[in-house]
Image (cartoon, rainbow, N blue to C red):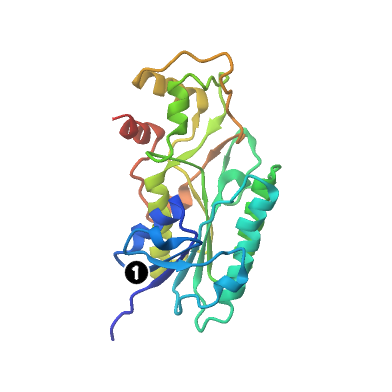
Amino acid sequence: MAISTPRILMAGCGKLGTAIARELTDEARVFGLRRHPDDLPGPIIPFAANLKEPATLTGLPPDLSVVVYCLTPDAYTDEGYRDAFVNGLRNLLEALSDAREQPALLFVSSTGVYHQDDDSVVDETSGTRPERFSGQRVLEGEQQALDSGLPATVVRFSGIYGPSRGRFLENVRLGQIDPPRPGPYTNRIHEDDAARAAAHLVRQRLAGADVDGRFLASDDEPARLDAVVDWVRQQTHCADPAPDAKRGGRAGSKRCDNRRLRQSGFTFRYPSFRDGYQAMLG
């Protein structure tokens, strides 16, 4: 009996969503849902819809194996985050409710759901009491995904960086970051590894592995912000810190433990900030 090709819906095809989709197109039919999908790279199959408008979600591709929910808010406001992580997901789940076969769900989340600011180690079982509306809405979306009745995976990404997200390096070069010493612990994941980690979890789901619940996706080396800045300054010419340089540390101070992701069989291409930034610096 022939094995059917998996059908995956990427709900949200921005920078990260498109990268995840491209990781999967060799082994699956991948549909890219966004408002204006005509410029999606092949072989992602475009599907025009707006997750804020339920009427546009009729006629979703049938027989989906997995839905990856990966949205970026339109605005850094409570309403923007609620629309992206709560209302949009609710609309999509409603549209999927009549599907002949219910797909699995992968919800892309963030370590912004953590509140810890005491250098402690956090994992998937750690408490989450975010003070900012952004973390609160993402956490609300997580719970909605896990309560959806679908086989659900939540992946919490730490700060994503890479060639298309080079603001931190640029700020260090320009002297716009001057962290306290010691600085807060920071956590990050290279954009290539972020896309690969999400695709890995999709493959694990399709293979029948237990990927229910939450996964924390961050590299192997939480690092104090001042140590990262000092390392960058040693690798390339940088201006002296400006008088109005940012101090950093908005995300608190915690150390993300990626053990569950590692134990699922995932390996990092860039296991530390040095590996990733060195590749960017050339």
Residue at 58% of width from left, 19% of height from top? Answer: 180
Q: Nearer the viewer, residue 52 or 140?
A: 52
Q: Residue furthest bottom?
A: 1
Residue 112 figure quarter: top right
Estimate the x, y position of residue 86 in percent, counting from the top left.
65, 60
Estimate the x, y position of residue 161 in percent, counting from the top left.
44, 39
Q: In the picture provided, is 273 more to the left or to the right than 142?
A: left
Could you tell me which quadrant the C terminus lies in? top left
Q: How many marks?
A: 1
Estimate the x, y position of residue 92 in percent, counting from the top left.
58, 69
Q: What residue did someone put label 1 on?
A: 28
Q: Is residue 127 visible?
A: no
Q: In the picture provided, is 125 more to the left or to the right than 17?
A: right
Residue 231 figure quarter: top left
Indicate whether 44 appears above or below 162: below
Residue at 65% of width from left, 47% of height from top? Answer: 135
Q: Is residue 210 visible?
A: yes
Could you tell me which quadrant the N terminus lies in? bottom left
- Give amino acid for label 1: Ala
Residue at 40% of width from left, 52% of height from top? Answer: 195
Q: In the picture provided, is 241 more to the left or to the right than 26?
A: right
Q: Crowding at label 1, few (<14), some or many (≥20) Cα neighbours within 10 Å?
A: some
Estimate the x, y position of residue 210 in percent, counting from the top left.
47, 66
Helix, strand or loop under label 1: loop
Indicate whether 62 appears above or below 280: below
Indicate whether 172 appears above or below 90: above
